[in-house]
Image (tube, rainbow, N blue to C red):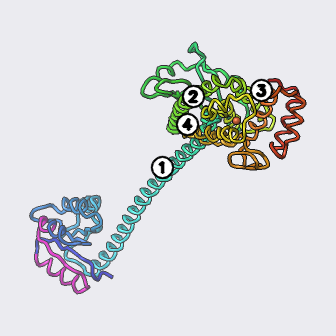
Amino acid sequence: MIEGTKILVVDDNPEVINILGDFLELNGCEIYEATCGSEALEMLKKKDVEIVILDVQLPDINGITLIDTIKVSKPTTAVIMATGYYDPNFVIDAMKKGASDFLLKPFEFDKLMLVMMRVLRERNLLIEKENIMQNLGDKKKIEHLNRELQKKIKELTTMYHISNKFNSINIFEDVYEKMIQIVGETLDVTSCGYYVPDGEGNELILYAGHTRDGSKPERNWQRISIPDDLKEEARGARRYVVKDNRIYLPLFIQGEPIGFIMTESKLNGGGVAKSLENDVFFLRLIAEKASTQIENRMLYESLFENILHTLKSLIIAITKRDLYTEGHCKRVTNMSLALGERLGISDYEKDVIKVVCPVHDLGKIGIPDKILLKPERLSDEEYTVMQSHSVYGEEIMSRFEILAKEAKIIRHHHERYDGKGYPDHLAGDDIPICSRIIAVCDAYDAMVTDRPYRKAMAVGEITSEIMRCGGSQFDPAIAQAFADLIRDGYEW
Ligand SMILES: [Fe+2]
């Protein structure tokens, strides 16, 4: 029942303490004693007291004042007031301060036991409630942290997806279009677009648009007015404008705004502003990624242009020696592109042809004049030297690391479909498709042109010859496509 309860008896009369203490100790309680208020407070600091039986009249501190101090420092400690006379106002005052009950002296031990048990039960409930509140508080804290954590995970996952999508954009794709597609797929927007200024600074013109349902952007989306504060904000620190349900965010290339991303969201009550601000975070990330990719591409393209310029100057050096090469390279390029188009090659392969074809005989720069310019047929020995131009061409081109694939096309432009070509005797589909296309066009151009050792052949005659060699020298499908191209009236 009350065994083991730690009780502090505070009374200025030692006799009262003794009587009360003896009785409670007989009932298994642990008793502490104090004869004044300050002694009681000292004892409370040292001992983990559960109940204080507190005399109202103390020599130093008033019992009512002491309740306040006890309740502040030990809120779960129950206080039972003890007094020699009953004063209802005093009782109400004590109860308001947090006293649990009231006992009249001299103590009736039966009543004391009942009060003790009730107070203990109340105290246990209070402790339980405190624990629940504490747990509830902890639970709320954990739930809040969990929500924050989930938000962070979602944010990081989205950032990861954005980076991944940008990394997977290939060189032939339009970065602005892909950027808007990523905006549409990442954010909860009804529509979005990339806009460029109209040149007069009044309106923005749609360059690429994306709608959630995949429909075409509406007509009034094609041209939109520039919000008044957009131009100033674009150059300011904030660098974006949120207006109604739209966000306008400029795209910067080398520090200059070159266009704007605009998104439109559905208005759904009070959370919109917060949601739009959240969208701005991801929009800025997307815009930064797009800018970096465009800047890298500009850098790559200027580097690429420089390399091509160098290679073309080498070709010019060859054409100064061998006039046939001059027009030949241009013609083979145009025809290879037309043939490639007919064969349905990829945009990438078309670009490879554009780069490789004009310089496919680059290696001839290493062939001595007496062989390159010899009007008569070449001897076997001379022919072997002449053949080395495909390997030499590859060697020159592979010095530019970014042209490694293109260098291989040059190496194999004299392979034969049956494996009897040079330099590696590759056969069939092992020969890169661009090399197989160039081989057909190269042969056609050689036959259609007057050479010192033979006259040009007629077009029909050449077509028959190429068809005849389909499956041996040439890829039969490419030979057929070539014949179709000529039949359809292809002109140089
Ligand atoms: Fe060649």
Q: Residue 451 carries which label?
A: 3
Question: Amino acid type of disc 2?
Answer: Glu
Q: What stretch is highlighted in magenta?
A: 14-40
Mark 3 touches mark 4? (CB < 8 Å): no
Q: Which residue is drawn at 75% across and 41% down?
A: 436
Q: Which residue is drawn at 47% across and 20% down?
A: 232
Residue reaching furthest to the bottom: 26
Q: In this view, does 150 lie above or below 190?
A: below
- The residue nearer to you, when weighing 488 against 84, is 488
Say which of marks 4 and 1 sits in front.
1
**Spatial separation of the CA atoms under disc 2 and disc 4:** 48 Å
The residue that disc 4 covers is 272
Say which of marks 2 and 4 sits in front.
2
At mark 4, the secondary structure is helix
Say which of marks 1 and 2 sits in front.
2
The residue that disc 2 covers is 305
- How crowded pointer 2 is (Cα within 10 Å; few <14, some 14-19, many 20+) is rated as few
The residue that disc 1 covers is 152
